[in-house]
């Protein structure tokens, strides 16, 4: 797998050409430390609405039972509500897609040591209105060992792709995208405070965190463009239909 760190392209041009762009140091070290500490405290409070990722039958053997992914925290957490409105997210997203944006959802991934990743997928295999753009803020340094983000540059040009079952030994979700022949996945080395922006058709995901003592936490906002269209109903390309058939 190719690894990428920095790009020399104009951000807008890279987003158009490759379907993603990394904005370095979008948030300061102090800011990401405070955000990370906040969510560690919130997670320690116990279950929250929308928690997902663990295997109940595995108990403590699955670290995602303790550090489940959070979803739509803005509905009950003031910090999340304020973050999704932050102009560094919203204005950058708006500029990249060439439209105003509206909130779709917020998420927090903890990805503790030993945790599974998420199989490569397109967001539109879950979210059927387009365009969607994700703003993915690294709260920890990310590399191959702790399960950095992986993208397939240019995959946004393939349109919506079929889905298939994923290997749940390495993915906490049970579906993945069909990967176009000749694709070259790239791991993105990021530092805490860097933000990755990618479109809803861009294939992305991550592999397990193989470290013994390093988290790979990320705060994520998905925005809809102000003017959206609905993808046609097609069970072959929908994760919800894949789950229903399981």
Image: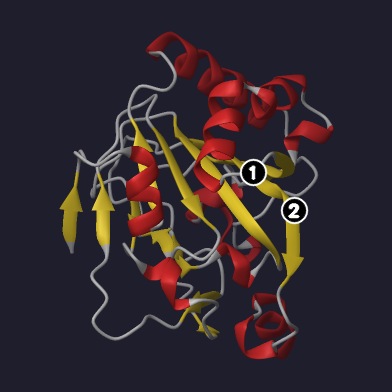
Residue 46 position in % (x across, y down): 73, 35
In the visual, does 91 lie left or right of 197?
right
Image vertical order of residue 110 relative to residue 127, above or below: above
Q: Quadrant of the N terminus?
A: bottom left
Q: Secondary structure at mark 2?
A: strand
Q: Is residue 148 visible?
A: no
* Residue drawn at point x = 73 percent, y = 81 percent: 232
Q: Which residue is mark 2?
A: 227
Label 2, label 1: how many angstroms apart (C-alpha)? Answer: 8 Å
Q: Badges 2 and 1: C-beta atoms under 8 Å apart?
A: yes
User: Is tag 2's residue or tag 1's residue first in the polypeptide sequence?
Assistant: 1
Residue 116 position in % (x across, y down): 43, 58
Q: Which mark is residue 99?
A: 1
What scheme was used to colour the molecule?
A: secondary structure
Residue 165 position in % (x across, y down): 52, 84
Which of the two residues, 37 or 119, is positioned nearer the viewer here? 119
Which of the two residues, 227 or 57, is positioned nearer the viewer here? 227
């Amino acid at each position: 797998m190719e690894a990428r760190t920095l790009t020399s392209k104009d951000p807008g041009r890279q987003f158009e050409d490759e379907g993603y762009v990394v904005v370095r140091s979008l948030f300061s070290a102090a800011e990401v430390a405070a955000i990370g500490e906040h969510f560690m405290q919130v997670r320690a409070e116990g279950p929250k609405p929308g928690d997902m990722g663990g295997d109940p039958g595995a108990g403590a053997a699955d670290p995602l039972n303790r550090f489940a992914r959070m979803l739509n925290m803005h509905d009950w957490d003031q910090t999340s509500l304020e973050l999704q409105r932050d102009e560094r997210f919203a204005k950058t997203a708006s500029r990249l897609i060439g439209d105003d944006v509206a909130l779709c959802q917020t998420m927090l991934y903890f990805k503790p040591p030993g945790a599974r990743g998420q199989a490569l997928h397109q967001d539109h295999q879950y979210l059927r209105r387009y365009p969607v753009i994700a703003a993915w803020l690294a709260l920890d340094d990310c590399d191959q060992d702790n399960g950095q983000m992986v993208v397939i540059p240019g995959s946004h040009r393939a349109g919506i792709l079929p889905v298939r079952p994923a290997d749940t030994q390495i993915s906490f979700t049970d579906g993945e995208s069909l990967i176009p022949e000749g694709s070259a996945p790239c791991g993105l080395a990021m530092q805490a405070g860097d933000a990755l922006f990618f479109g809803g058709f861009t294939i992305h995901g991550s592999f397990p965190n193989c470290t013994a003592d390093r988290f790979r936490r990320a705060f994520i906002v998905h925005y809809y463009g102000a003017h959206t269209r609905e993808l046609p109903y097609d069970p072959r390309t929908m994760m919800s239909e894949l789950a229903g058939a399981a």
